[in-house]
Amino acid sequence: MCKHSISIIIPIQHKIKNLTGILKACEQLQPLEIILTINGYTQDSIGSADSYNCEIITLEEPIESPNLYVIGAKKAKGQYLLFLDENYMVPPSLLIQFLQPLLNGCADVVLNNLDDFFYQKQQPNLAMIWQQVTNHFFYRPDLNINSLLFPPYAMTKEVLEVINPDNLSNPILAQMKIIEHKFRICDQLNIPIPQVLPFPSTQLIHYHLEAIANWISKMQDPRGNYTDNNRKRDIILGLQNGEQKSIPKIITGKEFYSNTYGDQQLSVIIPVQNEEKTIESVIFEVQKLKPFEIIVIVNGSTDKTEELAKSCGATVISYEEALGNDTGRAVGAFFAKGEILLFIDGDFLISSHDLLPFVQSIQNGTDLALNKLEHYYMYRLPYSIVTACKYAVNLACNRKDLGMGSTTAVPHAFSRKCIHTIGFDSLLSPTLSQVKTILAGFHVQNVHSVDVDKLNRVRPEKHFSQEGCLSLATQQIIGDHIEAISYLIEQKRGKECF
């Protein structure tokens, strides 16, 4: 290996017993230099380094670990930079294999392959969940959780100069810039490490939100260029502005005042498209809840869904064109008269017994009642990107208690006062409505578990995809989460938490 090519950077934050072993392994690479950045510790922490001709940079005051890499990177003179962790020794044979794609000119950046951790059958830590999410946001789902957040990693001097060494202080931002500039990333080799170390939650969320904010700015799109899948947002804008062309055909159905929920009335909102096989049974079931009204939003249907809904006594709102996912919910909320708004789908039946807890929760003071999805913690590992996105957004809102609870999933229910505050148009993008609700200080909780995945009708045109590609439904949901995080970032910009 060429002696004048490699700079090795190792941050030292603790007095470590295996420093000699780490340095001995590094020496076998014949590097140009080994740079140790010492985080507020004295010479006795690194006494063994003297015999290895290391450049030692000692800081009087402790700083965050990534900043130690920044200091070392700025000092580095080599053509290739290898960043190691103080906590474990990597055999030199593996380090040589790890660097080979750089030395051969086949890659510009090398990341450690952590698929063993990604696919293991246990709940991932928050750092892994967030990394899965941002790699998808940045259009590199192939990286799974592989990241500059988890050393070892390596890059060429050219990469460092382009992304700016200071950006290593936020590893996620640095990785975003690597992806933005289309540098070649190799992540084929697994260097075994004891664990993927957790990070403080606040620091971790800051890293990711800052990187996502930069990405959104570069994309010039609050959805990060992910599809909206033909949502008719103009219809909702027209309703907001009172435009006659946006007013649908409405056939008012039966309305029943009831004291079942005290002085509050229940509106059940059901968007449908070609659901003649299920709509009658769905309506009959929700009638057991004694709602004031059942609103069926029929859009783009070519079957008998509309006639069947009318015959069941529902209020039917009709659009000839398909409105796209979730637009029907927003339309239903606009026309609903109740104080409690329950949202379900029309393509599968949920028992009234399972729907009642959502209604009662709003009656008792909750403003957004979500489907409790804790069972996802225990199986279906690794998490799908949709599940990971749900969890990440709740973490970003400082609502870890909500887990995967999300308005992306039905059933859920809103209070009328909440809808009035966040705007019915927010329901166009389900996750945006949830984030707005949380940030506005409304009461949000998971109230009951309904396994809708087993009930939901599979739509091949939305749910299936070519190998290696995301389905349209998944792409849209990712876009919804980016849109919600865009809103969160704007609300938090300049504040200490961001």
Image (spheres, rainbow, N blue to C red):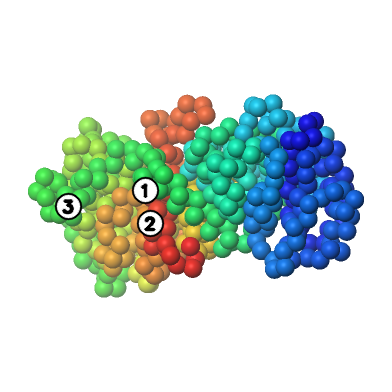
Amino acid type shown at disc 3: Leu
Q: Quadrant of residue 234?
A: top left
Query: Where does the image place residue 59, in percent across and percent down from the top left?
Result: 72, 64
In the rendered structure, are the residues bearing label 2 and label 1 in contact, judged by CB atoms less than 8 Å apart? yes
Q: Name the residue under label 3.
A: 239
| Residue at 18% over, 59% down | 255
Q: Name the residue under label 1.
A: 222
Q: Quadrant of residue 487?
A: bottom left
Residue 44 disc label: none
Residue 328 placement, left or right of 253:
right
Residue 382 placement, left or right of 446:
right
Q: Is mark 2 on a helix, strand or loop?
A: helix
In the rendered structure, are the residues bearing label 3 and label 2 in contact, judged by CB atoms less than 8 Å apart? no
Residue 402 appears in the picture as rendered = no
Q: How far apart are marks 2 and 1 (CA)?
A: 8 Å
Amino acid type shown at disc 1: Pro
**Label 1 vs label 3, nearer the camera:** 1
